[in-house]
């Protein structure tokens, strides 16, 4: 089992589609280990997007990501990082496949509804950046046996 980070960006918050996005993850069978609304600032964004700081679009990224709060989600499941990335779709939402969250809800490369961790290593760092340990809850929902076969958990 893995836990990964998803941020519903201001573009998703402003469009009032947070519930629809969260429902997609829940319907897939991912478990919400943590969820909170938070206002991001330039300091945390410079850390989170350190690989983009020197790019010409970085100032507009900061502006975009601070317009409203974001919804931070910690989602757990078997292969959660890859499952969430597949559900998310291409970064440029115009190129994202129908059926993906960005493909169904987005039209922009920057205003692309959400961020999702791209690896287990990134997920660990990002979860620590956005959640305190006491904000994460490891529990087993009653629906668990209907989501996973026992061999899924032993693989």
Image (cartoon, helix red, strand yellow):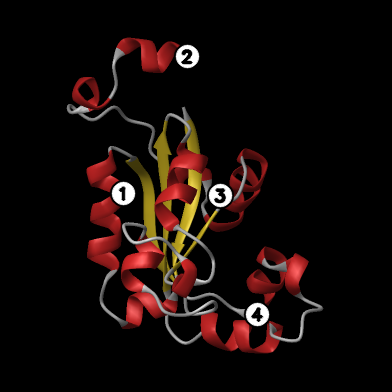
Q: Position of residue 139 (x, y in %)?
A: 32, 30
Q: Position of residue 82 (x, y in %)?
A: 51, 41
Q: Which one is nearer the viewer's eye here, 36 or 74?
A: 74
Give the quarter of the image for residue 106: bottom left
Q: Check disc 3 and report its element: helix, strand or loop.
A: helix
Q: Which residue is mark 2?
A: 155
Q: Check disc 2 and report its element: helix, strand or loop.
A: loop
- Mark in front: 1 vs 3: 1
- Mark in front: 1 vs 4: 1
Q: Which mark is first along the chain, 3 or 4?
A: 4
Report how far apart the C-alphas of labels 1 and 4 lie in the structure.
28 Å
Q: Which mark is first along the chain, 4 or 1?
A: 1
Above or below for 20 versus 45: above
Give the quarter of the image for residue 107: bottom left
Which residue is rendered at x = 60% and y = 53% of the image?
A: 126
- Mark in front: 3 vs 2: 2
Q: Which residue is mark 4?
A: 42
Q: Is residue 135 visible?
A: no
């Amino acid at each position: 089992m893995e836990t990964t980070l998803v941020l519903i960006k201001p573009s998703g918050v402003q469009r009032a589609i947070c519930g629809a996005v969260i429902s997609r993850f829940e319907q897939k069978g991912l478990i919400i280990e943590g969820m909170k609304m938070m206002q991001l600032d330039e300091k945390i964004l410079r850390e989170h997007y350190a690989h983009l700081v020197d790019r010409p679009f970085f100032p507009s990224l900061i502006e975009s990501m601070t317009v409203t709060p974001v919804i931070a989600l910690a989602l757990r499941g078997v292969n959660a990082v890859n499952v969430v990335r597949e559900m998310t779709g291409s970064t440029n939402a115009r190129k994202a496949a129908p059926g993906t969250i960005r493909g169904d809800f987005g039209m922009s490369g920057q205003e692309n509804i959400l961020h999702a961790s791209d690896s287990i290593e990134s997920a660990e760092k990002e979860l620590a950046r956005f959640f305190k340990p006491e904000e994460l809850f490891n529990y087993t929902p009653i629906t668990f046996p209907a989501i996973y076969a026992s061999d899924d958990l032993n693989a």
